[in-house]
Amino acid sequence: MNIDFAFVLVVLTALAGLIWLVDSLLFRQRRRDRAVQAADGVYREPVAVEYARSLFPVLLIVLVFRSFLFEPFKIPSGSMIPTLLIGDFIVVNKYAYGLRLPVLNKKVVDLGLPERGDVVVFRYPVDESVNFIKRVIGLPGDTVTYRNKEVFVNGDKIETFGKTDFTSRDLKCTTPSSDARRAQEQLGTVQHDILLHDTSRARNGQWVVPEGHYFMMGDNRDRSNDSRGWGFVPEENLVGRAVGIWLNLDFRKGCADWSRVFNGIN
């Protein structure tokens, strides 16, 4: 079951703030007056009000930080290997593509748009309760072609070079398949690594990106569920740009790769 943490956080913040506000306006002074008149003169605050007063500022700070500045995510699959590995905990810049209201996801301040090569977290168009992370390959209006494991954008081939075997030295927590090959790809101004599998078929096709949409692909090109299968990502589904790794811990294997901590995402 996917829990909408943003919704839960908004509800808790609103509830704590409402309890604190109502008590301040209607009940606090009465309690103080009764305490003055009481024999012991002790002022007693209801437990619910005490918790609300203490938690509201904390919840509000977390809500603002998570909604408008940065949000943590965990990588659950290998679709972005070798850039991102299973067990990577990443930080996502939430304001890179504009400020959006939590839960409603409505943009209120326009601060920028994705660039080719950005690694982006977005709400999966097929099931918007699920977050995906992929790399931007096609911008609005682009024609993207994938043929024989090569990418073409508007007819221009995206160059790859430096192909080498992808071995167990590259992954501390997972054993790579024997047919895996690492290569470097020059995507606009971004140079990054991709992974290809010799025995996998190329998912050939050509797509024209509609206005207001983006074409996304995983860096693990033969092991990625991406725009080649389910289509384009609407601009309103963008969550933010992945900017760094703050931890790598694969709970399933009980394995951690400390060399990845505080690495940037290219």
Image (cartoon, rainbow, N blue to C red):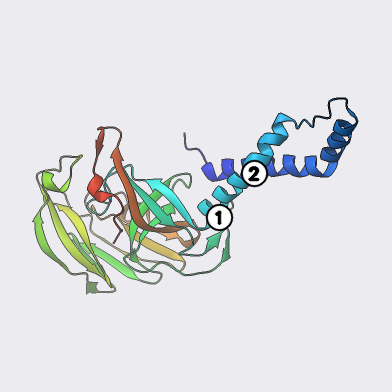
* Number of numbered callouts drawn: 2
Say what amino acid the circle numbered 1 marks. Asn
Q: Is residue 124 visible?
A: no
Point 44% across, 45% down: residue: 130
Residue count near mark 2 (Cα–Cα under 10 Å), binned few <14, some 14–19, many ≥20? many
Q: Position of residue 9 (x, y in %)?
A: 58, 43
In the displayed structure, does residue 149 sit left or right of residue 68? left
Disc 2, SS: helix
In the displayed structure, does residue 153 sit left or right of residue 29? left
Residue count near mark 1 (Cα–Cα under 10 Å), binned few <14, some 14–19, many ≥20? some
Q: Nearer the viewer, residue 39 or 235?
A: 39
- Compared with 192, 44 (above or below) is above
Q: Position of residue 62 (x, y in %)?
A: 54, 48
Residue found at the far right of this picture? 37
Q: Position of residue 232 (x, y in %)?
A: 40, 59
Between disc 2 and disc 1, the foreground one is 2
- Compared with 225, 16 (above or below) is above
Q: Position of residue 125 (x, y in %)?
A: 44, 51
Q: Which residue is mark 2?
A: 56
Residue 11 quadrant: top right
Point 51% across, 64% down: residue: 98
Disc 1, SS: loop
Point 39% across, 72% down: residue: 141
Label of residue 45 in the image = none
Q: Which residue is mark 1?
A: 105
Point 34% across, 45% down: residue: 75
